[in-house]
Image: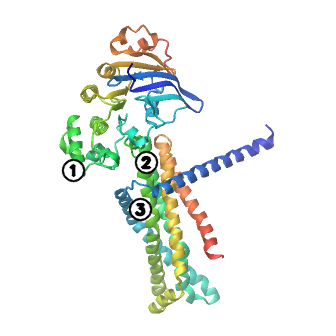
Amino acid sequence: MTTPMIQFQDVHKSFGNNHVLRGVNLDVMKGESMVIIGGSGTGKSVLIKLVLGLLPITSGKILVDGHDTTKDERDAFLARFGMLFQGGALFDSLPVWKNVAFRLLRGSLKRPKDEARAIAIEKLRRVGLKERVADLYPAELSGGMQKRVGLARAIAAEPEIIFFDEPTTGLDPIMSGVINELVREIVVEMGATAMTITHDMSSVRAIADRVAMIHEGVVQWQGPVGDLDNSGDPYLDQFINARAEGPIEAVR
Amino acid sequence: MTLLQSLLSPIGRSTLGLMATVGRISSYAFATVSHIFRPPFYLKELGQQILFIGYFSLPVVGLTALFTGGALALQIYAGGSRFNAESAVPSIVAIGMVRELGPVLGGLMVAGRVAASIAAELGTMKVTEQIDALVTLSTHPLKYLTVPRVVAATLTMPILAGIGDVIGIFGGYLVGTTRLGFNSAAYISNTIDFLQSWDVTSGLIKAAVFGFIVAMMGCYHGMNSGRGAQGVGKATTNAVVGASVLILTSNYILTELFFTS
């Protein structure tokens, strides 16, 4: 049997008395695009932060390629990941190309400056941005362009695993469609394993191979994207059809 | 709960909270110092911070020193005239500036400018997930953000204080020679004759400590900023207040160490 690329084993996470995750069990296979859906505040982003070690796990285990994430050598471990943050999280003080090439300008993946810039420009082109954008600062870009730059940064070092946290939040429907297409194309052409957090159903259908829904701190439902509309799960049905009435309380 | 308990428990809670903060800041400071000597070294970031903390603080430190030196000369002249000790103005201005006012006022001005700016910048980076992004890009935030700022402030603050000392003494000289009737050559000779090297060295050591405190408080509060604009605002205030109080406290302790043995 193939080892899953990312494996959540009975993962719990609490912030004081707030028990956000209460035993998440989920496997993400190599090369698969898994989309995590769920209401606001259900701990979807926390899942990603736990994998990357940005937050400590309260109990349970996360394995990446069969290895415990807390025991691997940090630099080598993080070099396997790329991440697109919800707000872009671009460094204001650096021009766009240095944001994209950040990892290539320092540390174990360091390249000569000219080469790093050339790679950054190529990645910017890949996400549909022209070379002139390279020397602008993040504050000079629109929200959609910032997302694209964030995407270029996430793929600059050719990671094996890419996380997308709310890739279309705050974008108009056309730009959302463009970003969704880009995410899907990039994941397919790189052969990367992807985990996307979203509550935008158009993103889910465009990006996902499989979908998992988090509710009340556990995986409420998981399955192929094609089964979304006939899952028979009342929680999932309420969520994907955006109904106020149903088992999920509208006021949390 | 008895009345006594209800009166004492807030004091206990505040004391515990204060102790916990002191512990967290100390542990952050130890971690920062340990990272200073371990690679990778971000020299470009260090250079940028030296420019920002040192060079761009010169006007504010210089102006503060100039007017403080002038006011000091006026005060010492007015006070000294009660004991026929007006001639002590040059030496007391010089000693007062280099031992105390240069480093302390310089430190406080830099605390206002730099600690606030560092806390606001890092706090904003925290709430916009830029610090998390650094981690995912295999870069240690403490090493990349805190170490260059702390090293730059510790190195540049003595230089700023030294320049402030000279400008402060010059302020006293200007007031002394133009307003108080001192002879120019006599003022300079009095200043140089009474000033000892330890007066200057002790002030510069103090300034280095104050520089460390300013950057450390800015970085600690910025990195631990709460969410949203309010969180960043609070972090900025805490950084400036914390740095100012620590400068004044450590100034007393250092003065005890340097001048009472």
Q: Secondary structure at mark 2?
A: helix
Foreground mark, 2 or 3, reads 2
Residue at image point 45% right, 92% down: B185
B243 up-or-down from B71: above or below:
above
User: In this rendering, do the residues under marks 1 and 3 share a single chain?
Assistant: no
Total marks in image: 3
Cα gap from disc 1 to disc 3, whole angstroms = 30 Å
* Contact flag, marks 1 and 2 (Cβ < 8 Å): no
Question: Picture coordinates of residue A123 (x, y %)?
Answer: 23, 38
Q: Which residue is pictured at 60% across the width and 30% down the height?
A: A17
For disc 2, the chain is B
Q: Are marks 2 and 3 on the same chain?
A: yes
In the image, residue A204 lies at what x, y percent? 34, 21
Q: At x 55% / y 56%, what residue is drawn? A: B241
Looking at numbered disc 3 in the image, what kind of residue is underneath it? Ile
Q: Nearer the viewer, mark 1 or mark 3?
A: 1
Reading the image, the residue beneath label 2 is B141
Against B115, residue A167 (above or below) is above
| Mark 1 or mark 2, whichever is nearer to me | 1
Position of residue A238 measured from the top left corner of the image (x, y, whole percent): 43, 13
Instruction: Name the mark on residue A22.
Output: none
Label 2 to label 3: alpha-carbon separation: 19 Å
Query: Disc 3 designates what residue?
Result: B53
Q: Kindly identify the amino acid type of the residue bearing the numbered disc 2.
A: Pro
Residue on which the image places disc 1? A114
Nearest the eye: B211 or A249: B211
Mark 1–mark 2 Cα distance, whole angstroms, equals 25 Å
